[in-house]
Each structure stands twice: as C-alpha cells, then as structure tokens.
Amino acid sequence: MATEETRLQKIARISKNQKNIRNVCTSAHIHHGKTAFTDNLLAAAGFMAEKSAGDLEMGMATWQHEDEQTRLLTVDAANVSMVHTYEGEEYLINLIDTPGHVDFSGNVTRAMRAIDGTIVLACAAEGIMPQTETVIKQALRERVRPALFINKFDRLIKELKMNPEQMQQRIMSIYKHFNELIEKIAEPEYKEKWQVDINDGSVAFGSARDNWALSIPFMKKKNISFKDILKAYELPEEERKAWFWDNAPLYEVCLDMVIKHHPNPLEAQKYRIPKIWHGDLESEFGKDLLSCNPNGKVAFVITRIVIEPRSGKEVSAGRLFSGTIKQGMDVYLNLAKQTQRVQQVLIYNGVRPEQMEEIPAGNVLAIAGVTGEAGETVTLEPENPFTELKHIFEPVITKAIEVKKSADLPKLVEVLRKVAKEDPSIKIEINEETGENLMSGMGELHLEIIENRIKTEKGVDVKTSEPIVVYRETLMKNSGEVEGRSPNKHNVFFMTIEPLDDTVYQAIKSGELPEGRIKKKNEAMWHQLEALGVSHDEAKQYRQIYKGNVLLDQTKGIIAIGEVIDMIMDAFEQVIDAGPMAREPCMKMKICLVDTKLHEDAIHRGPAQVYPAIRETIKEGMNKGGATLFEPVQIYAIEVPNQFMSDITKMVTTKRGQMLDVSHEGTTGAIIKAKIPVAEMMGWASDLRSETEGRGVSSLVDQLFERVPNSILPEVLRQIRQRKGIESMYTTTA
Ligand SMILES: Nc1nc2c(ncn2[C@@H]2O[C@H](COP(=O)(O)OP(=O)(O)OP(=O)(O)O)[C@@H](O)[C@H]2O)c(=O)[nH]1
Ligand SMILES: [Mg+2]
C-alpha cells in the first residue's frame, strides 16, 4: 500500500526534476528584512510555527549562532529549501538568506556562486541604499538575475502617512532607481534584458514582517487597490492578518515571482558557465557544465563551510553544476590537489541538512567528509577549476591575537585555521618566528564577532590588540634595469619593475584574470590580456599573477631558465607577502626578469642562491622606482539631517578625509559622500552617533588603496617597523 510521501521524500523527488528547481538568495542593504522574509516563507511552507515566523525576539529560524540572536542581525548565510506549488506543478526552491552588514558581505559573494537568481529587498521608506547597489554588483558579476521586493510597505502607511498616490509614486521611484542600477552595472547583453518589469510580476512589494506581498498583475487579478491595503491596516490585528493571508500572501506572490522570473538551472548554466568557468567549453566536461548534465562528470563548487563544534565534522555547502554526487564517492579537490571521499550527501529540508544517497546536478546541497576550502571545485578527476570566488572588498582591519594562558597556544593556531575556513573573509597570518598572530577582517564588528566566537564556541581564551591598519608597498615609476647577484656571485639577475597597468590590476582584483602560476601556452589568458591592452608578445611573457602583482619572463635563450623559474616565483611571492620597506604586502607591480646569467652547475644555483638574489633585485628595483606605501581608504555615504552638515564636514576633514559629493534628500536631510583613510576610521560609528545625536547613518560604498601622504609617511613607517621590531630597510626616495 502506498504510504504518504514525507516532506523530505518530496524534496528528493523534485530535486531530480531540474526544470522545477530554482536556486535563489535574498540580498539587500542591512536590515531591509531578508531574514523576516525567509522566515515567513519557511513558515508558509510548513517548516515552522507561523506564529513566531519573522519575529526577531522569538528568534529567526535561520539564525544558527547565538551572536545573531543577541545582536539581532545576520552574520552567516543560511541555506534553506522548500516546496512551492505554482500552476499545479511542484517546485523546489533552494534559498540562501544572506547577511546585509557590509562586514559579512563576503558571504553574499560566495552565495551568489551557488544560485541563479536573487530577490533584492529594498526598504520602501529608505529606498535603494549603498549596500543595495553593492549586492546588485555582486549578483551581476556572477550572472545572477535580480528580482525586486520592495519591503516595509507598512512604514509608508504608519510612519510616513502616505496616500495611495504617494505610495504608488514611491514604488515607481524605487523601481526606476533599481533599473537604472542594472542598466549601469550589467554587462552590455543584460542591461536591457534583465531590467525588472512592474507589469510582469518581477517586482513585488509588501511587508515581510507582516507576511504580505502584492504585485501589479496580482492586484489586477484579485482586484485589489492601494486603498484596500490602507484599509487593511485599520483592521484589528487578527483580522488584518487573515485579510493579508487571504488576499496578499507573501509566499505566493514572491515564490510565484521566483518561479516565473528566475531561471531554472538548465537555463541558467548555459550563460553562467562561460562567465564563471574558463575551461574548454567544447570538452566533454565543458558540455556537461553547460547542460547541467546529471549523468555527466561531477562538478561541485564549495561556497560555504560549517565545522560542527562537537564532532569537528566539516559540512561543505555549495552548488552541483554537473553529475550526480553520491555517498561514498571518491572525488578530487582541484585546489587542494587531493582525492578524498564523500561520506555524506545532504539536502536541506527547511533549515535542516538531511542525509540522502545521491543528489543530481542543478541543486544547492552539502557534502561531508571532504575538507576543502570555499571556492574549491570538486570533480572526479583533475579538471580546470571554477574562477576564484573573489570578494569585492579586502579585509583591511587587523588585530594581533594572543592566548591568555600559554597552555592554549597550540590550540589557538588550530582554531584560527578553522575560523579562516568557515569565514574566508577573515585572513589569518601566523608568524612562527615572532609568535605574532594577525587576524584581518572587513571591519571592527567582524573582528569582534570572530573574537567572541573563538572564546565562546571554540573555547579558547584570547585577547586582541587595538586595530592595526595593513598598508601596501608599491613603487611610483619604472625602476630602469637593476641587477642582483646570488651570495656565491655566480648568478646574476637583471630586472625592471614598474607600476602595473590599472586595467590589468582591476581585472585581477575582480577575479576576472585568475591568479596563479602560468603554464606554458595559456592561450585563453593571452587573449584575456590582449583584450586588456597588453601586447601579444608581452602577454606571452606572463609567468605568474600573485596578489595583484605580475611576474614576466622576458629572457631569451637561457637554457636553464626552466630549472630556476619556480625558485624565482617563490622568491617573488616572498617579496610580495612582505615588502622591503616594512614587510607589508606589495601591490600593483609589474616585475620583469629581463636577463640572467646562471651558473652551469645546478648545484650552484639552488634556492639558497636564487632566493636572496631575487629578493635583493626586487628590493633594489623598488628603491629605484620610488618605493612608497599605500593605505586603505574607504568611501562612505553618510546620511544626516541638514543641521549637522557642517559638523560632519569638519569631522571628515579632521580625519584626513575628503568630501566627494553632497546630495539632498527632500528638504531635511543630506547624503554626503566622503573618502576617509581606514587608519582614521577607528571609533567612527560612535563619533558619528555623538556628533549627530544618534541620527547619522553611514554605509560603506567602496574601498581602495591610495598613497600615504609624504608628510606622514616617515612616521607611519617608523610605527610599523617599531611594532614589528624591524630595522629600517632603507629610506624612501619618493
Ligand atoms: N516595519 C517593518 N519592519 C520590518 C519589516 N520586515 C522586517 N522588519 C524589521 O526590520 C528589522 C530587520 O529585519 P531582518 O529580517 O532581520 O532584516 P535583515 O535584512 O535580515 O537584516 P540583516 O541580515 O542583519 O541585514 C527588524 O527589526 C524587523 O522586524 C517590514 O515589513 N516592516
Ligand atoms: Mg538577516
């Protein structure tokens, strides 16, 4: 006798029907309502008690860490899956709820790899904010298609007391602004095609917290007007809830939008793969990826790792682009260059990962037993990996971290390794020599949360220093030819160093130009470089791209070059990681090996000879080329009531900041765009609060590196060197 299908069985069944899968995420400016939205969708799909859905105090279903509940904000991306019926057919919605705070926005970058469509939420009262623009950038970079949900509509009624006409105007203005951003940011092919359309249901509006949504087509179909919404808000609570549930159900309007407007994996992979995988599309593997072939070769990309605190088990969530992943399968990790075994295959049932025997291509899922890193491409045999998962911002705030009890020291190194794995936006530097461990993050809150998790979740008692800024070393002009000899004087290297072209640098920073050592005859990369304005001859000389710097081999006819090139690259990396001025990382340099004289005997040109020679040559070149320091600088949009304008202008200037733009919001407020060095940003949030009686809000718009002014350069250098206990290496000529 047939028994009733469980919810898990239903999810498993639909997971095999790729046409009926939608992989999506929420994305928005901080606190625009993503988690309330996700919670209410889960509740409607029967995964949690409806009563507590979207209720912050009761706890969001997707908040898996205590700190999220205490601070009432999302830190980690959360995967959930649910089933929705649309026009009589069942669909599996794999949804990732992403954090809005810019410190955690690396999670958004990574989630975008796993999904094909995003629901961008925008608060009806605040409108499109700087972080809204950032998430649109993050989506379009991965060819993820956006839809728009204008949230917190109730604020237009309760706080802004708008009439139906004003409401309509507000919606139209946010909708227009959203499309302008798509027009501005999208690749040429998608500028028009991916505009959202208020008349076709790719725009919805409503209240995630109050669990309702509408779109223009839905209003027409059900004959609902803006007046009806106003009236609904006059009803007593229970009646209002019932009215919304019957006439404007959030889950129905929004999930219908997802199903209709967002692509299924079969459609999406056709155009996403060429953007995110740079291998041969004509190969069998390439064809499997393009067609999302469940019977093809396995291709799974890890986008998020969770380490279970008790068992230490690593669960790697991500997207299966091709093949069927099975329990017990041996797989190859292309970055780690290792074969490992998949012990468990998990699919999300609501928020809970549940074990399955196998899951086919086109799904967001998780595997256990494999210890990779986020961004890893998991296949059956060595393959060309997916492009690197590069976040738009780099971690620029650093703290030294140490244990309180020396017995905990070995544990700390282990825990720091885990922390960096779970949150790849955290950068850890462990210095065995000095014992100084550095932890860099996106901002002060980021570091605070991680430090707290090390204490409470990982159980290591640590203390941290005041925040430190990490600078970059670079040079201002072409060094001309410089030479360096190995300690035994038998090997000579001739080099030139110059600032790297901006176009190439930007392409590396965005991840478009992959980093790494370059094998001979990488024609795909030559073409890419030529498109960036590099000559064909020079493109062929590229040997390595490392942390925004490049190494070129321009030597001719040196027979033994193949035997030393790896050592040269090692030494190049050593200099880039710790530059000659203050052991800060280097950026934006083009280092060319022009010629070399090598000892005939390999024994006299080993690492002990090559490493110091290359390091010395690069150091000499940087010196000749006007070595200097760059510092991280952030651009903020600061919203303040008009009366605080002059105080804020003063505050920006005293922080070595620069006003870039001022625009006025209505008649009462202004949005100031200002550029401020990170070194001066410490305590910014509380300064802003006190200057504006708590009414100023600032959000990060962009981040860049700029030259440290000459007037303060000697002092900055002195401080870094003093902290690191290093002698001055040389004084700058810049
Ligand atoms: N008035 C109103 N408030 C809402 C609505 N949706 C969410 N909120 C409130 O906005 C705040 C943030 O809600 P969340 O759902 O946590 O927002 P979020 O976008 O997930 O926040 P982060 O993940 O931290 O960026 C909470 O106080 C919610 O109660 C809404 O429709 N109307
Ligand atoms: Mg949230």
Image (cartoon, rainbow, N blue to C red):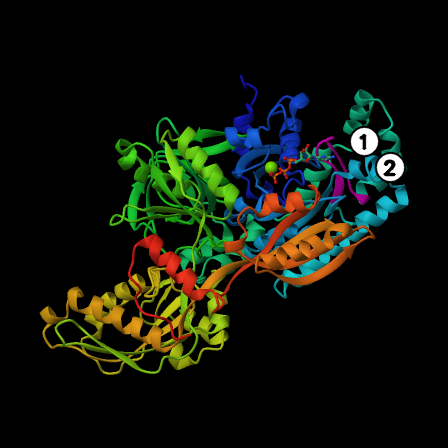
Q: Secondary structure at mark 2?
A: loop
Q: Quadrant of residue 32?
A: top right
Q: Which residue is mark 2?
A: 224
Q: Which residue is mark 1?
A: 247
Displayed-image quarter of ligand 1 = top right
Q: Is residue 211 magenta?
A: yes
Can you say whether 8 is above or below 131 in the image?
above
Q: Amino acid at mark 1?
A: Asn
Res. 70 visible in picture: yes
Q: Which residue sits at x=64%, y=49%?
A: 698
Disc marking residue 204 = none
- Please give left or right for residue 227 compared with residue 271 in the image: right
Region in magenta: 204-216
- Please give left or right for residue 89 compared with residue 514 in the image: right
Mark 1, residues whose alpha carbon is within 10 Å: few (<14), some, or many (≥20)? some
Can you say whether 596 is above or below 27 in the image?
below
Instruction: From the viewer's side, name the closer residue of 77 and 596.
Output: 596
Disc 2 + disc 1, Cβ < 8 Å: yes
Can you say whether 518 is above or below 351 in the image?
below
Q: Which residue sits at x=67%, y=46%?
A: 691
Q: Amino acid at mark 2?
A: Ile
Q: Earlier in the sequence, mark 2 or mark 1?
A: 2
User: In x, y percent, where is residue 533?
Assistant: 49, 77
User: In x, y percent, where is residue 115?
Assistant: 55, 46
Q: Secondary structure at mark 1?
A: helix
Instruction: From the viewer's side, name the closer residue of 597 and 159.
Output: 159
- Please give left or right for residue 183 compared with residue 338 in the image: right
